[in-house]
C-alpha cells in the first residue's frame, strides 16, 4: 500500500489546504469531510482565515530575510578593503615591534606570546580590530604614528577606510535586525498555522483509511501518494536507572537488541501497564505487531541500559 507524503514547506502545505477545500466544496452535500469536520470540531473557514494571516507573516518574513541577505552583501563589500589593509598593517606593526609582541595588544590586535596573531572569524571581531588600529594611529601626534611609514608608502586613505568600516557596521546592524525579525515572523507564522496544519494531517489520515488503495482520489484532495518505503535508521537508546522512555516510529519486523550490561523491560503501546517483557543482556527481540510504539523501562537501581532499535 502506498503512503501519504505531506509537504514540508509552508507553501506546499497551504496549497494542500486549497486543494482539500476545492474538492470539499465541489462535492457539496456529498462531501465525505462533512461528518469528519463535525466529529472533530473543525471549522474549515476558520482554518482558511488563519492561513491568510500565516501567509501574510510568511510574505513579511521573506522580505526581511531578503533585506538581511542584501545587508550582508553590502557589509562584506564595504569591509573587504579595510580588512585587507588591516592584515597588512598588522604584519607591518608586528615587524616594527619585534620581538616585543605585547605592544600589538595596544593596537587592538589579539597577539599571543611569540607574536602569533589569532584573528577572529566573525565580522564584529574583525571590525573592532580595524577600528582599534585606526583609532590608535590617529591618536598619535601628526606624522609620529609607527604606522605612518606604511600608510605613506602604500597611499592608504585612513579617513576613507574608517568611513567604509562605519558603513559596514551600519549594514551589520540592519543584517542582525532583519534576521531577528524574520525569525520572529517564522514563529508567528508557525503559531497561526499550527491548528490548520494539524487538521490537514488529520484529514489526510482519515482519507487514507477511507481510500487505502485509491491514489487518484487522494490526489484530487491534493495528497501525494508514494510507493517507496520510509527511510529507516538504527537508533541507540540509553536509559538511566528507574527511568522509562517512549519509543515511537519503530519499523515492524526489525529487531531490538540489548547491547548494554543490564536487563530491562518492554511494554507494548504508549503506556506502561501490565507486566513488562524482560529483555536480558545480549538478547534480541523482534518488533512485531503491537510494537510500533513501546515503553522501555530500566528497573535497575544502578547501571544505564543501552539498546538498539530501527526507527523511521
Image (tube, helix red, strand yellow):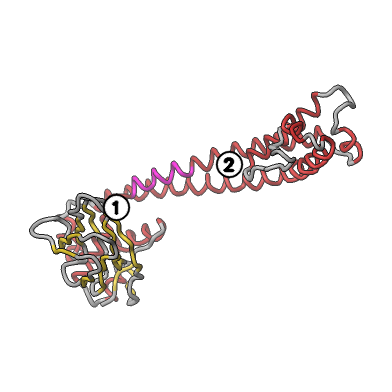
Q: What stretch is highlighted in magenta?
A: 182-193
Residue at position x 34%, y 67% in the image? 234
Label at residue 196:
1
| In the displayed structure image, the side of residue 169 where residue 85 appears, left or right | right
| In the displayed structure image, the side of residue 194 where residue 77 appears, left or right | right
Looking at this view, is 157 or 66 the one in front? 157
Estimate how packed mark 1 is, as few (under 14), some (14 to 19) or many (20 or more) residues with alpha carbons within 10 Å. Answer: many
Predominant secondary structure in magenta?
A: helix
What is the CA distance from the residue labelled 2 to the residue labelled 1? Answer: 32 Å
Estimate how packed mark 2 is, as few (under 14), some (14 to 19) or many (20 or more) residues with alpha carbons within 10 Å. Answer: many
Q: Is residue 1 above or below residue 114?
A: below
* Residue 220 percent location from the top left of the image: 30, 70
Asked if disc 2 and disc 1 are in contact, CB closer than 8 Å, the reply is: no
Which residue has dot 2 on it?
175
Q: Does the magenta stretch include residue 208?
A: no
Quadrant (top left/top right/bottom left/bottom right) for the C terminus = bottom left
Looking at this view, is 249 or 308 the one in front? 308
- Number of the front mark, 2 or 1: 2
| In the displayed structure image, the side of residue 63 where residue 12 appears, left or right | left
Q: Does the magenta stretch include residue 191?
A: yes
Q: In this view, does 166 lie above or below 293?
A: above
> Which comes before the other along the chain, label 2 or label 1?
2
Label at residue 102:
none
* Residue 252 percent location from the top left of the image: 23, 72
Amino acid at each position: 500500500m502506498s503512503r501519504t507524503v505531506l509537504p514540508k514547506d509552508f507553501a506546499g502545505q497551504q496549497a494542500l489546504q486549497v486543494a482539500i477545500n476545492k474538492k470539499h466544496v465541489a462535492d457539496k452535500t456529498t462531501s465525505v469531510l462533512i461528518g469528519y469536520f463535525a466529529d472533530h470540531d473543525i471549522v474549515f473557514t476558520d482554518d482558511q482565515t488563519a492561513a491568510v494571516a500565516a501567509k501574510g507573516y510568511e510574505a513579511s518574513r521573506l522580505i526581511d530575510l531578503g533585506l538581511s541577505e542584501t545587508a550582508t552583501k553590502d557589509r562584506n563589500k564595504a569591509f573587504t578593503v579595510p580588512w585587507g589593509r588591516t592584515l597588512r598593517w598588522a604584519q607591518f606593526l608586528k615587524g616594527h615591534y619585534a620581538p616585543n609582541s605585547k605592544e600589538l595588544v595596544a593596537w587592538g590586535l589579539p597577539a599571543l606570546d611569540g607574536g602569533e596573531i589569532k584573528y577572529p572569524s566573525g565580522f564584529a571581531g574583525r571590525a573592532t580590530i580595524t577600528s582599534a588600529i585606526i583609532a590608535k594611529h590617529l591618536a598619535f601626534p601628526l606624522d609620529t604614528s609607527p604606522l605612518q611609514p606604511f600608510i605613506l608608502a602604500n597611499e592608504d586613505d585612513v579617513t576613507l577606510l574608517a568611513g567604509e568600516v562605519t558603513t559596514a557596521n551600519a549594514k551589520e546592524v540592519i543584517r542582525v535586525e532583519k534576521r531577528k525579525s524574520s525569525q520572529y515572523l517564522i514563529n508567528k507564522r508557525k503559531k497561526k498555522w499550527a491548528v490548520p496544519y494539524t487538521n490537514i494531517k488529520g484529514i489526510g489520515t482519515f482519507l487514507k483509511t477511507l481510500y487505502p488503495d485509491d491514489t487518484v482520489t487522494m490526489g484530487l484532495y491534493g495528497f501525494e501518494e508514494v510507493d517507496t518505503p520510509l527511510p529507516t535508521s538504527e537508533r541507540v537508546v540509553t536509559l538511566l536507572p528507574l527511568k522509562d522512555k517512549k519509543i515511537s516510529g519503530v519499523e515492524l519486523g526489525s529487531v531490538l537488541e540489548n547491547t548494554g550490561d543490564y536487563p530491562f523491560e518492554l511494554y507494548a503501546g504508549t503506556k506502561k501497564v501490565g507486566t513488562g517483557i524482560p529483555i536480558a543482556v545480549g538478547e534480541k527481540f523482534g518488533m512485531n505487531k503491537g510494537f510500533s510504539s513501546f515503553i522501555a523501562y530500566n528497573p535497575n537501581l544502578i547501571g544505564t541500559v543501552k539498546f538498539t532499535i530501527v526507527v523511521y
